[in-house]
Amino acid sequence: MTETLAIELSVAAKATAKTWIDNNLARLTEWHTQIWEFAEPAWREYRSVNWYVDRLRAEGFEVEAGSGGMPTAFSAEWSNGDGPTLLTYAEYDAVPGNSQAATTSEQPSEGLSRFAPGHTDPHSVLGISTLAGLLATQHAMREHGITGTLKYTGEPAEKMHGSKVVHGLRGYYDNVDAIVSFHPFYMLPLCNTARWDTPCGAYYSKVYTFTCDSAETWQIAADPNSPIPASHSAARAPGANVALMQMYTASRVMQDAMLPSVGGWSISDAILSDGQATADNLPARVARVQFSWRTPDIAMAEHVLAVLDRNARLAAEMAHCDLEDRWIARSRPGRTNHVMAEVLYANLEAVGAPSYGAEAVAVAQEIQRNLGLEATDHPFLAETEQLISPQEAERALREHMPAWQQNWTSDDYVEMTHYAPTVRFYVSRPALQPVPGRGAYPAWVMNALGGIPATISPTIDVAGKTVAGTFLDLLTRPSLLASARREFEERTAADPMPALLSQDFEPPIDLPWPDYRGGAQRMW
């Protein structure tokens, strides 16, 4: 097929895909509401993954549930004959402590504590948007006789960089010709654009477990004939909680000394709870703390690791505890691909930025009034309804970065970029324009807007059509994939970055992660 005929086929197929999304947008928005309301936290997304598996099987995909040994992951595939293999993916984990109803005032979802999980980014729309693009592409391939294979993976625990490194190590991204990675925008200038030269950086996460299994050996009992040997001595043993607090405070005190004050790095923590005695005369047997850190490069990540490992070892010795440490994630910085970025952005330009209609504006204005603000005629952040080219977004991003820095923030899509040519793109999620003198809106506002159909539907529409258009260009125009592959191989040869975890790395699904607790009150 000549390039001219290939372009004509692509144009016709993209029109078919666009029409499919137009005709199904109401249904897609209903699907999004379902995932948004499930709001399940990392590694515990059981209802969400079952929904995706059932949906994909109904659409004709072969689906492996529990892929890579992860109960809430999946890998789906559909083929229409020989041709390129293209991949995109769903995420669906929510964040504990962020329950918010899809309403215009601050309140948790009905029947739940405000500390229950809620979608913040929201990953609910990430998954449904890529699903829209996937199914629209499938429909166009059938209608126009386009051959090739579509792969779709379910990626749980993104907030912990959980599944993509595992899927990569297990071979789920092998033999893929190109990958499209989408995320609702989360920072300017990366809104309605694609990344160009500055991918996300390194991310490390580790759980340190302190166990006090021999509290009775802390001191020698005064009475060796006691029927409960050393009971009082055991009660006075420092125990696991003391080790945890020593580790936590030492690491927080040293945080500013771990890395320079520039570079967009961060460190966060979480305390995991299990094995605690309640109102007893025993020391805590086990305490766990998770540290996660984002850095521009691996060298900085390793420096933080060395400090944390040392702090943990010394805290355990001080508190009469044993120490175990376990990797949760260890992601390397990503690779960009200009060919893929140009193909995708051309399709985003053809679709146009999201536009918020009268119903969405009314929702935003009601939020403003509920916050005691005067409703504005144009409540949405101006950039959410504008496009910005990858090159211009890159220029604006670099204004805020040191010249030496090659990566910014972190996200686990970076692991995918080491297996196939990958583009990372962003479409706006609804966000409100700050009112002068009042500062940013409270976090619940963006969370709520992410669950209200009128405000989130434009994201599904634009992102879904962009994914479909990009896929159909890559399926019908072999020269594009060949150019993207050459660039990928050149970048890989120039800067080899082997995986940071071993082939036999096991996903940490067995740790006591926050879990949904059902019941009459549906509380946490």
Image (cartoon, rainbow, N blue to C red):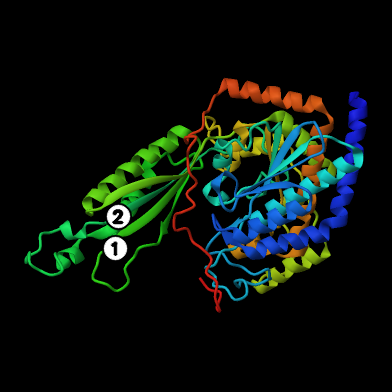
Query: Does residue 322 appear in the picture of this structure?
Result: yes
- Can you identify the residue that label 1 sits on? 284
Residue at 58%, 67% (x, y): give it: 99
> Residue placed farthest to the bottom in the image?
520
Residue type (three-letter) at the residue carrying disc 2: Thr
Residue 254 in view, yes or no: no
Quadrant in the rendering for residue 124: bottom right
Q: Please name the residue that numbered disc 2 is placed on.
A: 211
- Which quadrant of the rendered structure holds the N terminus? top right
381 or 36, which is in the foreground? 36
Give the residue at x 44% y 58%: 512
Question: Percent x, y for residue 225?
Answer: 7, 67
- Residue 133 placement (x, y as % from top left): 78, 47
Image mark count: 2
Amino acid on which the number 1 mark rests in the picture: Ala
Q: Residue at x 76, y 63 (%)?
A: 30
| Contact flag, marks 2 and 1 (Cβ < 8 Å) | no
The location of residue 489, given as percent across then percent down, is 64, 22
The residue under the point 78% across, 34% down is: 343
Sequence-wise, the earlier of marks 2 and 1 is 2
Q: Nearer the viewer, residue 431 or 371?
A: 431
Q: Nearer the viewer, residue 381 or 297?
A: 297
Q: Secondary structure at mark 1?
A: loop
Cα gap from disc 2 to disc 1, whole angstroms: 8 Å
Apparent side of residue 54 relative to residue 311 in the rendered image (left or right): right
Tell me the crowding category of disc 2: few under 14, some 14 to 19, or many 20 or more residues within 10 angstroms, Cα based. many
